[in-house]
Image (cartoon, grey):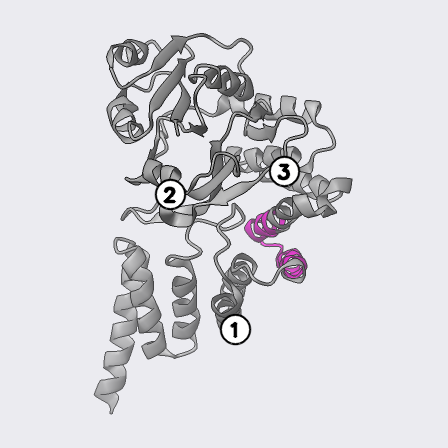
């Protein structure tokens, strides 16, 4: 079995060494450089671990075109294709998992665990299933937020590696996203009936800080005919949640409650709507309701490993909010315990530390009064 890692890059010199070391578990490494000026291309050409590197500018720029061009560089005897970016690293042993479990005549897609971000102490955040391991039977579509599409008539038969293959993303925050918006508008124009593409445009407005435009787009997504289809279920949930979050930012709590309830009616097994309700109830000084919502999140919410789940949902967020509600309700011992749980995930947070000290003072005061 031959495994080939393929990638696109531009000005990734600071990532090259670690990335090549990590990806060298594969049989081949192929890279399409799309116009580096920092020495990345020259370094890749000189490194013996690189099977093939080619420099080609993609004009006009599209991620799907670049991905497809990079895949063409893979040797013809490649059985399993693995697409990564230079700011992504697998945990060691990833290729061995493929060699051990992949059956060439049976599978054509591989699913694994992906951490899009990490907390200040290195804990994975925004963790979901990823799917960029595949056979030759696929091609890339969409100018941005590109996805793999089966070639005509090919059924997708996937192998789920779970956490046995774990890819970590270490985002280069110095890179600009300004061209994403134009590409998303193009994608919406090319796919006017696709709610997922429109949802991504709404998300981009949030990243730009334009909540009014984001709210308008998400509400339009919820009206689209395909949003109720089974394959667009995550689009529906994501849009409901983010409409609620925008209304929370706007302090329109009636709308927050309504959209959270709609989410829960669709699926009660996510923590996010309960935690958002808890946040607004804490803000409204309705602490008993806030406590109840968090306990619902902890009881009913399970980790789905999809992109609906938010960064701190399974880290400090629930315990932080619960400790606030309990403190306000005079449950200082319970509050202290949950503050401790939150601090384990976020030990440098000044507000959490101040809350913990305040809780200790309350407990000490109670002991003195005894």
Q: Is residue 155 above or below residue 57?
A: below
The residue lying furthest to the right in this view is: 225
Q: Residues within 10 Å of mark 3 (few under 14, many from 20)?
A: many
Q: CA distance from mark 1 to mark 2?
A: 37 Å
Q: Is residue 169 above or below residue 33?
A: below
Q: Residues within 10 Å of mark 1 (few under 14, many from 20)?
A: some
* x and y percentages locating residue 53 in the rendered image: 36, 12
Q: CA distance from mark 1 to mark 3?
A: 31 Å
Q: Residue at x 43, y 12 (%)?
A: 34
Q: Is the Cβ of the residue at disc 1 closer than 8 Å to that at disc 3?
A: no
Residue 165 bears which disc, if any?
A: 2
Residue 292 bears which disc, if any?
A: 1
Q: Which residue is mark 3?
A: 199
Q: CA distance from mark 2 to mark 3?
A: 29 Å
Q: Is residue 167 visible?
A: no
In terms of sequence position, does the residue under pointer 2 or pointer 3 come before the other?
Answer: 2
Q: Residue at x 28, y 62 (%)?
A: 354
Image quadrant occupied by the C terminus: bottom left
**Residue nearest the viewer, comparing 147 with 138:** 138
* x and y percentages locating residue 299 in the rendered image: 50, 70
* x and y percentages locating residue 178 in the rendered image: 50, 23
Report the side of 275 relative to 96 (left or right). right
Mark 1 or 2: in front is 2
Q: Is the Cβ of the residue at disc 2 closer than 8 Å to that at disc 3?
A: no
Task: Look at the magenta stretch and give its main secondary structure.
Answer: helix
Q: Which residues are drawn in magenta?
A: 241-263
Q: Is residue 249 visible?
A: yes
């Amino acid at each position: 079995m031959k495994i080939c890692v393929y990638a696109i890059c531009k000005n990734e010199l600071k990532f090259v060494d670690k990335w090549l070391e990590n990806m060298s578990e594969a049989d081949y490494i192929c890279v399409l450089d799309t116009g580096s000026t920092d020495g990345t291309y020259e370094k890749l050409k000189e490194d013996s671990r690189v099977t093939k590197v080619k420099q080609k500018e993609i004009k006009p720029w599209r991620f799907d075109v670049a991905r497809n061009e990079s895949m063409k560089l893979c040797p013809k005897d490649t059985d399993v294709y693995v697409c990564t970016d230079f700011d992504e690293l697998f945990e060691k042993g990833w290729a061995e998992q493929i060699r051990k479990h992949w059956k060439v005549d049976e599978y054509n897609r591989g699913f694994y665990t992906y951490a899009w971000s990490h907390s200040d102490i290195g804990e994975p955040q925004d963790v979901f299933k990823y799917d960029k391991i595949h056979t030759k039977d696929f091609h890339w579509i969409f100018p941005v937020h590109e996805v793999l599409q089966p070639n005509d008539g090919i059924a997708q038969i996937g192998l789920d590696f779970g956490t046995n293959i774990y890819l970590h993303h270490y985002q280069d925050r110095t890179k600009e996203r300004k061209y994403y918006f134009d590409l998303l508008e193009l994608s919406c124009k090319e796919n006017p009936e696709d709610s997922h593409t429109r949802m991504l445009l709404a998300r981009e407005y949030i990243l730009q800080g334009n909540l009014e435009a984001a709210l308008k787009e998400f509400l339009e997504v919820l009206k689209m005919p395909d949003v109720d289809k089974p394959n667009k279920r995550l689009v529906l949930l994501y849009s409901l949640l983010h409409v609620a979050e925008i209304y929370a930012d706007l302090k329109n709590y009636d709308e927050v409650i309504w959209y959270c309830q709609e989410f829960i009616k669709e699926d009660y097994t996510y923590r996010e709507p309960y935690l958002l309700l808890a946040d607004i109830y804490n803000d409204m000084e309705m602490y008993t309701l806030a406590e109840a919502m968090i306990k619902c999140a902890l009881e009913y919410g399970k980790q789905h490993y999809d992109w609906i789940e938010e960064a701190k949902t399974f880290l400090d967020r629930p315990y932080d909010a619960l400790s606030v509600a309990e403190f306000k309700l005079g449950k200082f011992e319970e509050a202290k315990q949950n503050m401790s749980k939150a601090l384990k995930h976020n030990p440098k947070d000044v507000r959490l530390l101040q809350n913990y000290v305040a809780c200790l003072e309350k407990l000490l005061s109670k002991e003195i009064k005894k």
